[in-house]
Amino acid sequence: QQPVQSPQAVILREGEDAVINCSSSKALYSVHWYRQKHGEAPVFLMILLKGGEQKGHDKISASFNEKKQQSSLYLTASQLSYSGTYFCGTESAGGTSYGKLTFGQGTILTVHP
Amino acid sequence: NAGVMQNPRHLVRRRGQEARLRCSPMKGHSHVYWYRQLPEEGLKFMVYLQKENIIDESGMPKERFSAEFPKEGPSILRIQQVVRGDSAAYFCASSVFPGQGYTEAFFGQGTRLTVV
């Protein structure tokens, strides 16, 4: 089952904040976040492991609630370069196919000047 | 250090022809994943390979599609007798270790297949 991302789209002005959520119905081992600009490859942002770790990357950070099987991506003081489609990819607990990611449908983020 | 290299970037095939997509992983990476992305949609897992082994092909259509990752050379995704519905962007990703959160997967630029 595909994780569900919300919202589907966000429109911001430069400097505003946004939160993108990713929710799964399966037990997760890790969550991976990527950003993709139109016509380009997905670019890795960060991995979160089970254990509720919160990680940061410049003004982009994320959390992972293992019990709720949810992850959130936080973008603060957004810049024009943040525009793109954000995907969460989930790695399920158990099984043998580590590294196989199931991606959400994406959240389109548009930042205006 | 070159990233994941995919070629060709764009491929046009007539219905019924064969399409061959190539992926060279990052240096030192021995795990390759293929994903398909339809227009305006997310990435869908197709197949996971290590050198000379298919580990998980649960996302591959049963017919016409095959993948390999030989001991030498790039990974190849082959689509035989292409149909219009095969038109999509095909992305390859590679990683060092297969997961358990230890490492991230890096994506190539993708091959955009158009079937006419």
Image (tube, coloured by chain):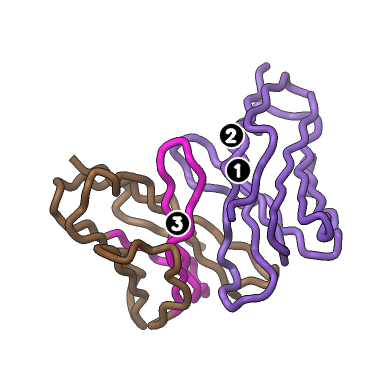
Same chain under badges 1 and 3? The reply is no
Residue A44 in sight from this viewpoint: yes
Q: Which chain carries label 1?
A: A
Name the kind of residue labelled 1 in the image.
Answer: Arg
Q: Mark 2 lies on which chain?
A: A
Position of the C terminus of chain A by quadrant: top right
Look at mark 3 in the image and give the residue it sits on. B35
Magenta range is: B21-50
Q: Where is residue B15 in the image (x, y as percent from the top left)?
A: 15, 47
Point out the residue furthest to the top here.
A113
Q: Residue at x 71, y 28 (%)?
A: A79
Q: The brown chain is which one?
A: B
Q: Which mark is residue B69?
A: none
Q: Chain A is drawn in which colour?
A: purple
Q: Does the magenta stretch include residue B7?
A: no
Query: Compared to B88, does B76 lie above or below?
Result: below
Q: Are marks 3 and 2 in contact (CB under 8 Å)?
A: no
Look at mark 1 in the image and give the residue it sits on. A35
Q: Do the residues labelled 1 and 2 touch (CB within 8 Å)?
A: yes
Mark 3 burial class by Cα count in 10 Å: few <14, some 14-19, many 20+: many
Mark 1 burial class by Cα count in 10 Å: few <14, some 14-19, many 20+: many
Q: Distance between the residues labelled 3 and 2?
A: 19 Å
Foreground disc of the pair 3, 2: 3
Q: Where is residue A110 in the image (x, y as percent from the top left)?
A: 63, 25
Q: Mark 3 lies on which chain?
A: B
Residue A14 or residue A25, whichever sits in front: A25
Q: Residue at x 64, y 50 (%)?
A: A3
Name the kind of residue labelled 3 in the image.
Answer: Tyr
Name the kind of residue labelled 2 in the image.
Answer: Gly
- The quadrant in which residue A82 appears is top right
Q: Which mark is residue A84?
A: 2
